[in-house]
Image (cartoon, rainbow, N blue to C red):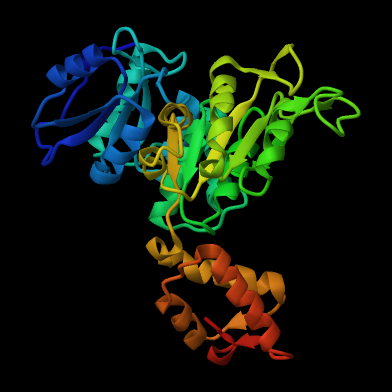
Amino acid sequence: MVPLSALPVRAEERSPINIFVISPNSRIQQELRGRLTQPYWNVIAGHSGAQALEQQRTHASKDGVVLLDPELPDIQADEFRGILRSRFPHLQVLTLNAHTGQLLIGSSSPTAVSIRLSEIINRSGAAMNSSSVRAGEREESDRIRDEESSGLRNMVGNSEPMRRVYDLARMVAARDTTVLITGESGTGKDLIAQGIHQISARRKQPFVVVNCSAIPEALLESELFGYTKGAFTGAVQSRMGRIHAAHGGTLFLDEIGDMPLALQSKILRFLEQGEVQRLGGTDNFRVDVRVVAATNAELMKRIAEQQFREDLYYRLAVFPIRLPPLRERMDDTQILARLFAARFRPGSVLSGEALRILMQHRWPGNVRELRNVIERATILMGNDLEIKPAHIVL
């Protein structure tokens, strides 16, 4: 390890190098600010991975260096390092000692550490030779980059709003934190929930979906919690509920805003205690379930109208993710349109004029509406392989 104060700097450096100090330890941030000063350094401090990503989008430059605490509050350091290298390949990522604020570069000697940072300074942030990256970090970066090619699994789109969604989904996937996905109907909230499950440690366990608006109110409680034999007329045998069926995996509560008020208190109790009691029974069953909920409703408005419990909202919204409507990510429209065209009619293409029509539409029904428009177009085109303006019905 080498103290940062011992690092050489070049007197002729024209502009300061951005140093991102990512650590929840305020003492380390303050010490580094005092030791890395202008005109050579521009220290930008962040407490978490999410805050760091926002800062790097604003401040990242070709000469940036990241000093990363191995213990972040919202994401594992190895996974965050992979995201950084995929999103911002020009940034140099070095690891801090969480207790001393010194650099830790694996088992490197102090001389090797000094040389490594000196190269960054002297080259004004030029990319390091790939051979200096440890094999484990390279594999992680490659894995993240592979997923980046198609956004998150099952998701399509590479616009900035969607990249933000992917970043948040990856961050929370490593934890068991409860997630609340909000967004208009047709934006793909269920796909984000599946994506979080598929890249989490629970991916080999069940992914159980409960659509709170599709199941009649009289049946929803028994579907969720199960029931014992004789609990009600027709209960000829005991049955496990869907919460229990999701044990070890993920429970996706879709359209949670439509859950009956009387049932919300029982869901809140389950979230707080991790136990379920079957309808008609007295025994409590411990369940290990990660909950992801989604809604297109304005829950704060529902709370004001006393249709949704405020305490349940805050228990669900530990980690909120807002899915943007298609009109806020129009750059993805062409990608999605071509994907749907190929899916419904292999070999088909969209004419330039047809694409222009699609790009001018506001898509109140979001991705679902776009998919339906393209499916209809592939039918109207008959034996033709080009989707033309006449085939686009909005």
| Residue at the extreme front of the image, as rendered | 233
Q: How many labels sit on residues?
A: 0
Q: Position of residue 376 (x, y in %)?
A: 65, 79
Along the line of sight, the residue nearer the viewer: 151 or 381: 381
Locate residue 173: give its quadrant: top right
Residue at 54% x, 49% y is 189
Task: Residue 291: give x, y in percent of width and height.
Answer: 58, 31
- Could one spot residue 128 in this view of the protein? yes
In the shown orientation, is residue 138 left or right of residue 70? Answer: right
* Horizontal side, residue 277 vs residue 231: left or right: left
Looking at this view, name the residue that lies furthest to the top: 99
- One can see residue 131 in this view: no
Compared across the picture, whether 58 is left or right of 104 comes to: left
The picture places residue 389, in percent across and down from the top left corner, at: 53, 89
Quadrant of image for the N terminus: top left
* Residue 347, quarter of picture: bottom right
Residue 36 % position (x, y)? 16, 23
Q: Residue at x 73, y 32 (%)?
A: 222
Task: Decide: is 116 above or below 354.
Answer: above
- Does 391 sit above or below residue 90? below
29 vs 131, left or right, is left
Residue plotted at (78% across, 25% down): 227
User: Which residue appears at 61% of the width and 81% of the height?
Assistant: 349
